Amino acid sequence: MKQILSELKIETHGEGFIDITSTINKWIATNKISQGILVLSTKHTSCSLTINENADPKVLKDLSSYMKALVPEEGIRQINGKGAHISYLHSDEGVDDMPAHIKTSLTCTSLSFSIDKSKLVLGTWQAVYLWEHRYLNHLRTLCLHAIGEVLPLKAA
């Protein structure tokens, strides 16, 4: 049994989803983990992690549209549409700043996975995504913490 703690840098290109499944599987293979568990977390407050469908890109577009409707840039209004509009107090980094923090709070900043045969155990149509909530490009840092069996070294 071995424990590996590492960081992975992912460059984002504005708001949207980045499929990081193959990048994580490459990290697992590089570290020769045959079976175990992996905890993946983001070290940021304006992006998140999600597992979702990888076959139909319309799923991700609908998910993004739903989140934009749920967390508007303009500020807070009661869901029933009644009541006064309240502007966000925090907008230091632009109009997408506070909405990005809310979206992160409503989603996940860490995920855990089983590893088997040196790959993530996922369903047929599942992928792991980094969900960037900001409009500008960012370099995001993910923390990977794996505990598991490591493949034996090959004899020379």
Image (spheres, helix red, strand yellow):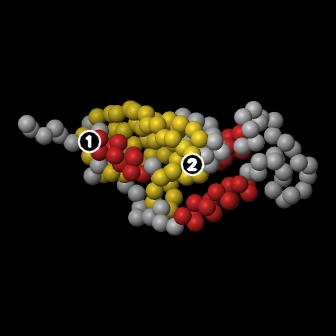
Name the residue located 51 percent from the left edge and 50 percent from the top edge: 18
Asked if one can make out residue 27 in the rendered structure from this viewpoint, the answer is: yes
x and y percent of residue 148 in the render? 30, 40
Which amino acid type is shown beneath numbered disc 1?
Lys
Quarter-wise, where is residue 28 in the image?
top left
Q: Nearer the viewer, mark 2 or mark 1?
A: 2
Q: Position of residue 114 (x, y in %)?
A: 37, 49
The residue that label 2 is drawn on is 131
- Spatial distance from mark 2 to mark 1, Cα to Cα? 27 Å
Would you identify the image quadrant in which residue 65 lies? bottom right
Q: Secondary structure at mark 2?
A: strand
Disc 2 marks which amino acid? Answer: Trp
- Residue 70 vertical position relative to residue 112 in the rendered view, above or below: below
Foreground residue among 83 and 74: 74
Q: Answer with left or right where residue 4 lies relative to residue 129.
A: left
Residue 149: tell me if it is visible: no
Residue at 76% of width from left, 51% of height from top? 72
Q: Quadrant of residue 90?
A: top right
Seen at 34% across and 38% down, the residue is: 147
Q: Residues within 10 Å of mark 2 (few under 14, many from 20)?
A: many
Most foreground residue, 1 or 7: 7
Estimate the x, y position of residue 95 in percent, counting from the top left.
76, 42
Residue at (48% x, 52% y) in the render: 19
Instruction: Single out the residue that lies furthest toward the left.
Output: 156
Left or right? Give the position of 46 relative to 121: right
**Mark 2 or mark 1, which has the lower sequence index?**
1
Q: Which residue is mark 1?
A: 32
